[in-house]
Image: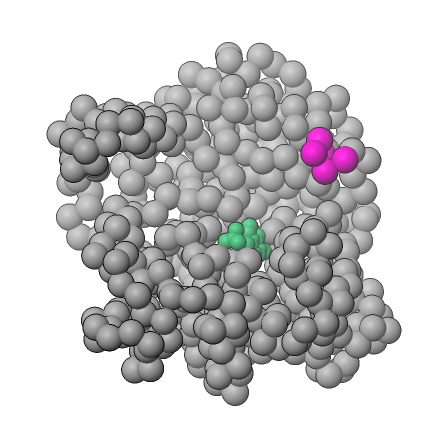
Amino acid sequence: MAAFFRGAVRGYAARVPSSSAPSSSAHDSFPLLRQQDGELVRLLDAESRRQQSTLTLIASENHCSPAVRQAASSALTDKYAEGYPGARYYGGCEIADQVEELARSRAKQIFGAEHANVQPHSGTSANLEVLEALAGSRGRILGMALKDGGHLSHGHKVSATGKLFEALQYGIDAESGLLDYEEIRRLAKEHRPSVLIGGASSYPRTIDWRELAAIAREVGALLLADIAHPAGLVAGGVFASPIGHADVVTMTTHKTLRGPRGGLILCKAEHAKKIDGGVFPGGQGGPLMHTIASKAVAFGEVLAPTWKSYAQAVLDNARHLAARLIERGLAVVTGGTDSHMVVVDLKREALSGQDVEERCRAANLAVNKNMVPGDPRPPRVTSGVRVGTAAATTRGLGKGDFDRIAEVLVAIVKGVDPASQRPTIERLCAEHPLP
Ligand SMILES: Cc1ncc(COP(=O)(O)O)c(C=O)c1O
């Protein structure tokens, strides 16, 4: 039973399908689609079955609630609403205005923020829009390098953020795998960026937002904190919040925050006008109002009393998993985690990150290969895998289950036939149905 939806979504528990074949169970998610488009519904059923029988340990994924999904497929998908509540460029927006206002006020309440923009289509859009608003064309930005755990949209050369801005990158200490704040300070003083970006895609440890804000202040930069990964943990009070330190905060709504696919920007009131203009008309046209409705539902779930215990369980499971992996002889980047993510270092193992990712797939475990500090292998191969606990915790898995997962991961890394591990994972999946 997916324990972490109880209480947040009334009546939900009674509707959880017990079968792994949604098409044939009493609960059919696609009754109209089934009549109209058999070709597509076969694919959707196959994806539902894949998710049911796979344990998702991809750190950037989660399983949102049926309520979040329902809102995402509402009548609002038909509504154009360019602009903002009370100032739209289309008629008929009186309901859309209330929906967006609901999402905005819930987002502000969750994080204690002065202003929220719920329109970004994705985390990348949010970052691009904020950078355009704060740094301006050809402005200088300083962010974490992709190979060290940063995100493409923090100034990588293949991203628009690396082409439209003068982008400089900082890394991590190759020995400890930790951020080196003195090195960031040195780079900031040398290059004097307009925007310093903090936050990462693959960094398991806490981030010292106060220190990053101090560095930004010392060089006259603004601080953008990207909490795409730990947003749900920040909301649950188990990961350091950048609110009060950063000028602007971006995040995705679909990772630990467990909402629909999308972006969210929070900022101090003094930046609100600039940020809103950066999103529309700067970076986007009409907002995805159905997604904004769905974000509002997800934010409502985060505001429910059960959220704190979900966030704590995600963290406890990740710490437990890291400890079990280390006990069983694997190396873990930084020796543990402060978040939902554990990065396994395979540098001294025979198998690469790519090998382990593929073998995990054969055991019905979804993980992704990842560069690790001082990685001698190229990015398509890598010497690491990144593992996250948010999705499995949503399914209700606890520490005992993560003991089994650690055993399976270690066996796979040590070269055991992954097919022999599949029954263990299938059993865990059957015991813990999808939301
Ligand atoms: C730190 C960080 N920022 C931004 C993004 C981009 O999000 P999206 O895939 O929604 O564009 C990600 C996605 O993984 C991320 O990890």
Q: Main secondary structure of the magenta part?
A: loop
Q: Which of the 4 image quarters holds residue 168?
A: bottom right
Q: Quadrant of ligand 1?
A: bottom right
- In the rendered image, residue 380 lying in the magenta stretch gets the answer yes
Q: Residue placed farthest to the front in the image? A: 90
Q: Residue placed farthest to the left in the image? A: 26
Q: Which of the 4 image quarters holds residue 15?
A: top left
Q: Which residues are magenta?
A: 378-382
Of 4 and 399, nearer the camera is 4
The image position of residue 260, as x and y in percent, is 37, 53
- Residue 326, compared with residue 175, is above or below; it is above
The image position of residue 407, as x and y in percent, is 55, 24
| Left or right placement of residue 256 versus residue 14 in this view | right
Q: Residue at x 65, y 24 (%)?
A: 355
In the picture, the quarter occupied by the C terminus is: top left
Q: Which of the 4 image quarters holds residue 166?
A: bottom right
The image position of residue 350, as x and y in percent, is 75, 21
Residue 8 seen: no
| Left or right placement of residue 377 versus residue 106 in this view | right
How many numbered badges does the structure rendering display? 0
